[in-house]
Image: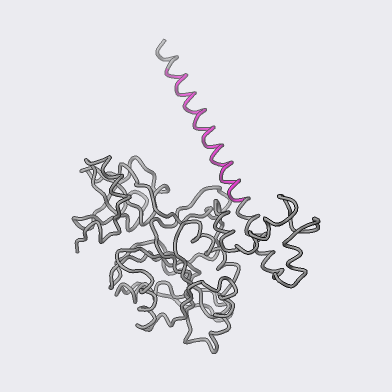
Amino acid sequence: MTYTLSDLGWSSSFQMQLDEAADLTPYRLTEIHRSQMSALGEEGSVVLTSPRIVAGELAVGDWVLADPEMRIQDCLDRKSMLQRRGAGTDAHVQLIAANVDTLFIVTSCNDDFNIARIERFLALAHEAGCYPVLVLTKADLCDDTSVYEAEARTLDPMLTTLTVNAREADSAAAVSDWCKAPQTAAFIGSSGVGKTTLTNALTGGDAATGGVREDDAKGRHVTTSRSMRPMLKGGWIIDMPGMRALRLLDTRDGIDSVFDDLAELETQCRFSDCAHETEPGCAVRKAIEAGELDLDRLERWRKLRAGEAKNTETVAESRARERKFSKMVKGVVKGSSKRKGR
């Protein structure tokens, strides 16, 4: 099947960038492999190579420009980018998905439901500029979904929340209503919450799905890589592997958007560097003492801020070391070349 650029999510902002490189052809990345990229363009599905840009600098959903030999020469500026600090001790940025309009935060009506984790995903969405939609799955296996719906409202009364049975057509329709053609949506959440089941319902696909362990509601990883697929009613969906741990970085504004009440109270504290502990004139502590603010919510806010600051600083330090090492290597190579020229 072939698509127009508009079908794929092309916009005027991308067109302006293309005008500066008229000899190159635009494609949208649908899958990323180690040495090759699957992409879609006006002539259909293609396979691209990336000699100039390493795979870690590209994400599913990116718009790239390729030459006639199908080599990626440039990546267009994104309108949104979902990213996190990579897993493990290695301090690097992991790109999750690009140019996403709607982020479906998926959690199930069981022990997987975790307010703190949802807040992390919300912060990610706000920082990236995506519209967040909370999707509560496995409604058919829960005796009373109102408990989870009520908890979700404590996050933000205006947060769009859908309670669904991922295997029902009506549920899939309710989800697709929040991503119209040619927009792009992405599913994010733990393994086993129904992301792939929903993706199958939205796309007509038959990707394998897995269940959850009954003792702790943890799911098995079935989706192993990110892929962008067309939805039956138009638009695009990016299905991603389960993500239980999300190490935020460069998301200070996103965190404060989720905790906007606390961020506003903080501006009323006597000291600009108030830690909200024992300082005099602390508006946050005053609100807690008056019963206007939940202490647990304050602790989650502080923990998110502290973790984000540490991750951001660690990645920045790693980047600085890499730049220093690269500069040193270039100096050694340059010096060696001069000596050979004597």
| Total marks in image | 0
In the rendered image, the quadrant that contains the N terminus is bottom left
Nearer to the camera, 180 or 287: 287
Name which residue lies at 53% across and 85% down.
145
Q: How is the image coloured?
A: one colour
Q: Position of residue 5 (x, y in %)?
A: 24, 56
Q: Residue at x 47, y 56 (%)?
A: 128
Along the line of sight, which residue is nearer the eye, 327 or 177?
177
Q: Position of residue 341 (x, y in %)?
A: 40, 13
Residue extent of the magenta highlight = 310-337
Q: Is residue 21 above or below residue 203?
A: above
Most extreme residue toward the top, as rendered?
Answer: 342
Query: Residue 198 occupies which quadrant of the picture?
Result: bottom left
Which residue extends farthest bottom? 143
- Which is the main secondary structure of the residues drawn in magenta? helix
Q: Does the magenta portion include 321?
A: yes
- 295 to the left or right of 162: right
Q: Is residue 134 above or below residue 10?
A: below
| Vertical arrangement, residue 22 with respect to residue 247, above or below | above
- Quarter of the image containing the C terminus? top left
Q: Residue at x 35, y 78 (%)?
A: 173
Locate residue 268, reporting x and y percent. 70, 57
User: Which residue is rendered at x = 20% and y = 55% of the image?
Assistant: 42
Magenta span contains residue 51: no
Q: Measured from the top left, where is residue 109 in percent x and y?
A: 53, 80
